[in-house]
Image (cartoon, helix red, strand yellow):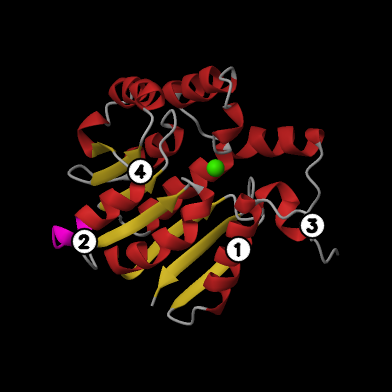
């Protein structure tokens, strides 16, 4: 028995993937091609993608928001898990990356479920609120600008329905959040965000050491 989560050595991680991942060809290709990209570290881990797909199915999510698309792996995982007629509002500002994402969405046959918004995430969230879409989203995945995490949160909270779920990526930030000597703007922004969510009694929450750390937040 350990008080810690298990230490994932390369050998354990490889075994773990061999008995959990269920990626299709398009997901494998997206992940392999993105791994050669200069910002490859921005791609979510495949186990996180699979977890999100499972959560989307458990919630029977039909309306999803994604903040931070990159080359589309996470949106592929969520869109595949949505029922026909489901809609995923995918927010990013870098067309250079989302044009790749669009190729994978088409190849996977999920392009018609995805509404790509090339604009700052805060603008798109405000647009959705102004369009009367409060309390209507089932699932929101946040993986965009770390300094804006605390600004996304109240908007996402309003857009989410009761019982809906937010999943926030990078909350352990490579461990930097636990290092008091690390005072970068991004690290401090994630610390402040983590503290705020922990103290917010309007939600149920649980942080998990998956990938770079995620927090699951359920609106009560
Ligand atoms: Ca991330």
Q: Is residue 158 above or below residue 78?
A: below
Quarter of the rendering containing residue 55: bottom left
Q: Farthest left residue? A: 131
Question: Is disc 2 surrounded by few (<14), some (14 to 19) or many (20+) residues within 10 Å?
Answer: some
Pick the residue in front: 62 or 167. 167
How would you rate the neighbour count of disc 1 (Cα within 10 Å): few for under 14, some for 14-19, many for 20 or more? some
Q: Which contiguous range is marked in magenta?
A: 128-133
Q: Residue at x 25, y 30 (%)?
A: 111
Instruction: For marks 3 and 4, give the one nearer the viewer.
Output: 3
Q: Which residue is mark 4?
A: 81
Q: CA distance from mark 3 to mark 4?
A: 37 Å
Camera-near label (3 vs 1) is: 3
Which residue does the numbered mark 3 point to in the structure image? 179
In the structure shown, which secondary structural element does the residue marked by tag 2 occupy? helix
Task: Classify mark 1: helix, strand or loop.
Answer: strand
**Mark 3 and 2 residues: CB-CB less than 8 Å, in contact?**
no
Task: Please provide percent x and percent y for residue 25.
Answer: 45, 21
Q: Is residue 92 above or below residue 198?
A: above
- Residue on which disc 1 sits: 207
Image quadrant containing the N terminus: bottom right
Which residue is most to the bottom?
Answer: 201
Comes first in the chain, label 3 or label 1: 3
Which one is earlier in the sequence, the residue at label 3 or at label 4? 4
Describe the element under mark 3 as helix, strand or loop. loop
- N-terminal of the pair, mark 3 or mark 2, is 2
Asked if 52 appears above or below 37 in the picture, the reply is: below
Give the residue number, with chain letter if any, for mark 2.
129
């Amino acid at each position: 028995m350990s008080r810690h989560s298990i230490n994932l050595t390369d050998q354990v991680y490889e075994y773990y993937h061999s008995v959990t991942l269920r990626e299709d060809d398009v997901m494998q290709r997206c992940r392999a091609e993105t791994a050669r990209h200069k910002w490859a570290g921005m791609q979510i881990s495949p186990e996180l993608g699979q977890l999100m797909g499972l959560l989307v199915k458990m919630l029977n999510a039909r309306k999803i928001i994604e903040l931070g698309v990159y080359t589309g792996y996470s949106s592929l995982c969520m869109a595949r898990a949505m029922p026909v007629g489901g809609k995923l509002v995918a927010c990013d500002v870098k067309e250079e990356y989302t044009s790749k994402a669009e190729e994978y969405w088409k190849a996977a046959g999920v392009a018609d479920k995805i509404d790509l918004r090339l604009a700052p995430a805060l603008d798109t969230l405000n647009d959705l609120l102004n369009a009367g879409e409060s309390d209507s989203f089932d699932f929101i995945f946040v993986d965009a600008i770390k300094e804006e995490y605390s600004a996304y949160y109240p908007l996402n909270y309003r857009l989410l329905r009761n019982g809906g779920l937010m999943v926030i990526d990078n909350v352990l930030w490579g461990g930097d959040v636990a290092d008091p000597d690390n005072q970068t703007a991004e690290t401090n922004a994630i610390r402040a965000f983590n503290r705020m969510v922990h103290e917010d009694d309007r939600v149920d929450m649980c942080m998990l050491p998956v990938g770079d750390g995620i927090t699951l937040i359920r609106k009560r």
